[in-house]
């Protein structure tokens, strides 16, 4: 039912903890380590688990979106948990999340702890929003995410494979002008399902731990005011794109939108393409 995906790039020491947390889950999962462009040290780590882990390796690193997409496409199951290579999941994460993943639930998310690598300090999860464990209306989660008071990392979620494939883009989000190390798509993973499912599951516990270290994206973003603004703009672009899709789908019923797309977009492009092909 569940594929436990670990995207990785040159973090062999951290990767061991991530793999161990996957193997020791109380609910057994397909485990996929996807590696684009790492040196041989990553391969050596995975070889110790080769009988329990599916290892996908590409010599060239085309970026984080291709890495995620490669792993998701090669998974065998309908539900996905992305565990980044520097983080780890509580051993009951998958089992507890599955209890809430009903037919009308888009995804399940949990709280997260923080572990500061430099000081070895563990900071337990603390809920700052009025949310309780159980099923929550998607409209409320949308309000919090779009408003900026809640960010749900894919690393703290059990997501639906098809919804993830519908959300992921290879490169920048269409019509968006800001970009910061691949961020934005991760927000769409938790926004797009809100249009298709009435509820979201929430577990008010810190069932995942995010490692804070010098090479993490969020730490890097806080090194300068310019970086911090760039990551905020990239996430705001994702929010705007989500809202545009949502409201356009309401303005244009599916049939009307299909007619508009077919006759006013596809046909002109088709004839333009034919012209260039005949010419060359």
Image (cartoon, grey):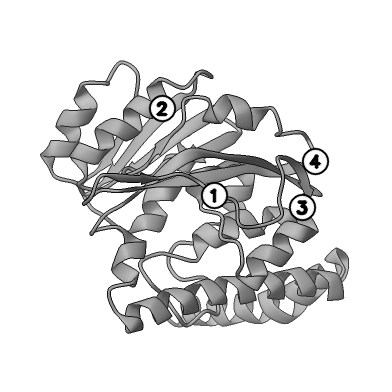
Q: Position of residue 156 (x, y in %)?
A: 52, 44
| Quadrant housing residue 19 | top left
Q: Position of residue 205 (x, y in %)?
A: 57, 39
Q: Position of residue 79 (x, y in %)?
A: 59, 35
Q: Is residue 13 above or below residue 142?
A: above
Q: Are marks 2 and 4 in contact (CB under 8 Å)?
A: no
Q: Is residue 136 left or right of residue 146?
A: right
Whole-angstrom CA distance, mark 2 to mark 4, is 26 Å
Residue pointed to by mark 1 = 126
* Label 2: which secondary element: helix
**Residue 192 located left or right of residue 246:** left
Frontmost of labels 1 and 3 is 1
Which residue is labeled 3 in the image? 196
- The tag on residue 46 is none
Report crowding for label 3: few under 14, some 14 to 19, many 20 or more residues within 10 A (C-alpha).
few
Viewport quadrant of the C terminus = bottom left
Question: For the residue labelled by badge 1, is the local secondary structure a helix, a strand or a loop?
Answer: loop
**Residue at (60% x, 44% y) in the render:** 109
């Amino acid at each position: 039912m569940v594929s436990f995906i670990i995207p990785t790039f040159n973090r062999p020491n951290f990767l061991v903890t991530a793999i161990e947390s996957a193997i020791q889950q109380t609910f057994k999962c397909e485990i996929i380590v996807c590696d684009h462009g790492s040196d041989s040290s990553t391969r050596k780590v995975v070889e110790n688990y080769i009988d329990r882990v599916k290892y996908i390796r590409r010599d060239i690193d085309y970026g984080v979106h291709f890495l995620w997409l490669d792993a998701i496409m090669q998974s065998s199951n309908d539900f996905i948990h992305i565990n980044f290579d520097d983080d780890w999941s509580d051993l009951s994460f998958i089992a507890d999340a599955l209890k809430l993943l009903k037919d009308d639930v888009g995804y399940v998310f949990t709280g997260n702890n923080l572990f500061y690598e430099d000081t070895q300090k563990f900071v337990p999860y603390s809920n700052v929003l009025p949310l309780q464990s159980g099923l929550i209306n998607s409209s409320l989660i949308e309000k919090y995410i779009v408003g900026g008071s809640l960010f749900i990392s894919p690393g703290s979620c059990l997501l639906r494979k098809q919804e993830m494939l519908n959300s992921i883009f290879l490169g920048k989000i269409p019509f968006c002008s800001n970009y910061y190390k691949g961020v934005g798509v991760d927000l769409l993973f938790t926004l797009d399902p809100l249009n298709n499912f009435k509820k979201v599951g929430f577990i008010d516990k810190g069932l995942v731990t995010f490692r804070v270290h010098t090479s993490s994206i969020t730490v890097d973003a806080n090194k300068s005011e310019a970086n911090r603004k760039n990551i905020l703009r990239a996430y705001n672009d994702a929010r705007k794109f989500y809202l545009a899709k949502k409201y356009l789908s309401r303005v244009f019923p599916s049939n009307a939108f299909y007619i508009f797309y077919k006759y006013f977009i596809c046909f002109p492009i088709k004839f333009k393409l034919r012209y260039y092909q005949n010419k060359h």
